Image: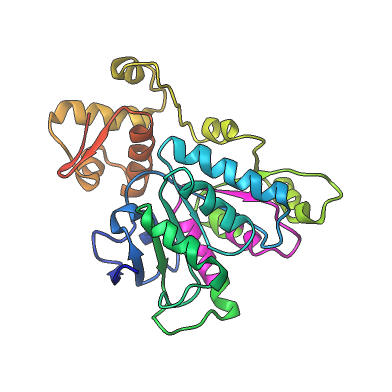
């Protein structure tokens, strides 16, 4: 397994979105690709450990479709929906981040050790806020959930029973200003009781990945050239990012862009992630450029 590293919250490699949440961790431990923490857009897929085969297949499909457009999938490496989300990503050679509720010297659950190795082989990462040697205690799963949502711009909930831990992840996401998408299911299915409560309380219903892309204003257009894509930008903040890069004529960092257009780095980071996925801007070693 790759060497264990520690990244403190003041370090530039610390995930920018995570740094800005309430009660952010002071440090995280990581196995694998450090770059995945800040590159690309990240969306979490969460749900019950006791998932149905249909729910697991749906999680794999959503992960596959997110992976296809360059989005990094985040989940918790638990059995059920979490495992299926990670599987759908690595099976399609995508990057995924697994957030554990214990020290990274051991994989929990042990049944997912092979899956953890596949995540690392595909340039993903395993992360935790807990020191090596610390076992997974019940309260740590709840604490872990705020990190899953904190890394992402949105979460997708698939099969959440009434007392599912994914409901806590959804609550954290809402408190952090993230979008919460919920896949609905049969009204008499116990695995969807919590899911339907989330929808009733204001979460966005998602019947397909298209719903999520539309609500997040992610436009996937492969057959348009860059000039056409720029002309069709209707988000004013994304347009400001592009305009400042055109004016600069050279790569700019997130902080530099944020300073020039007077927006919070968190907002700029999200808009940049969308623009990268849409093929309008690209990341270089010196920053972002057209």
- Residue at the limit of the structure toward the right, as seen here: 188
In the image, taking residue 207 as reference, residue 215 lies left or right, namely left
In the image, taking residue 180 as reference, residue 160 lies left or right, namely right
- Residue at the limit of the structure toward the front, as seen here: 114
Q: Which of 180/67 is in front? A: 67
The magenta span reads 142-170
User: Percent x, y for residue 235?
Assistant: 41, 28
Question: How many marks on residues?
Answer: 0
In the image, taking residue 45 as reference, residue 229 lies left or right, namely left
Q: Quadrant of the N terminus?
A: bottom left
In the image, taking residue 90 as reference, residue 46 lies left or right, namely right
At a point 53% along the width and 44% down the height, the residue shown is 63
Question: Image quadrant of residue 127?
Answer: bottom left
In the image, is residue 169 part of the stretch drawn in magenta? yes
Residue 109 in view: no
Q: Which of 285/178 is in front? A: 285
At a point 32% along the width and 16% down the height, the residue shown is 225
């Amino acid at each position: 397994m790759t060497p264990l590293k520690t990244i403190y919250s003041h370090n530039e490699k610390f995930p920018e979105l995570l740094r800005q949440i309430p009660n952010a961790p002071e440090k995280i431990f990581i196995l694998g690709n450090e770059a995945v923490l800040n590159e690309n857009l990240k969306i979490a897929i969460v749900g019950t450990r006791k998932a149905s085969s249909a729910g697991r297949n749906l999680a794999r499909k959503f992960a596959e479709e997110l992976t296809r457009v360059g989005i990094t999938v985040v989940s918790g490496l638990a059995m059920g929906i979490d495992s299926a989300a990670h599987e759908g990503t690595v099976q399609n050679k995508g990057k995924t981040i697994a957030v554990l509720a214990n020290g990274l010297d051991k994989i929990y659950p042990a049944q997912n050790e092979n899956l953890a190795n596949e995540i690392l082989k595909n340039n993903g990462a395993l992360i935790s806020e807990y020191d090596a040697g610390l076992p997974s205690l019940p309260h740590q799963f709840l604490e872990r959930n705020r990190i899953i949502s904190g890394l992402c711009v949105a979460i997708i909930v698939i099969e959440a029973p009434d007392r599912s831990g994914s409901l806590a992840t959804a609550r954290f996401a809402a408190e952090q200003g993230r979008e919460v998408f919920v896949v609905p299911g049969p009204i008499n299915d116990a695995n969807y009781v919590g899911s339907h409560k989330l929808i009733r309380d204001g979460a966005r219903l998602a019947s397909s990945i298209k719903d999520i892309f539309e609500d997040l204003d992610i436009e996937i257009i492969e057959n348009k050239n860059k000039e056409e894509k720029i002309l069709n930008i209707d988000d004013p903040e994304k347009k400001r990012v592009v305009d400042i890069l055109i004016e600069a004529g050279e790569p700019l960092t997130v902080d530099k862009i944020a300073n020039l257009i007077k927006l919070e780095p968190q907002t700029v980071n999200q808009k940049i992630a969308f623009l990268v996925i849409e093929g309008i801007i690209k990341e270089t070693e010196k920053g972002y450029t057209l």
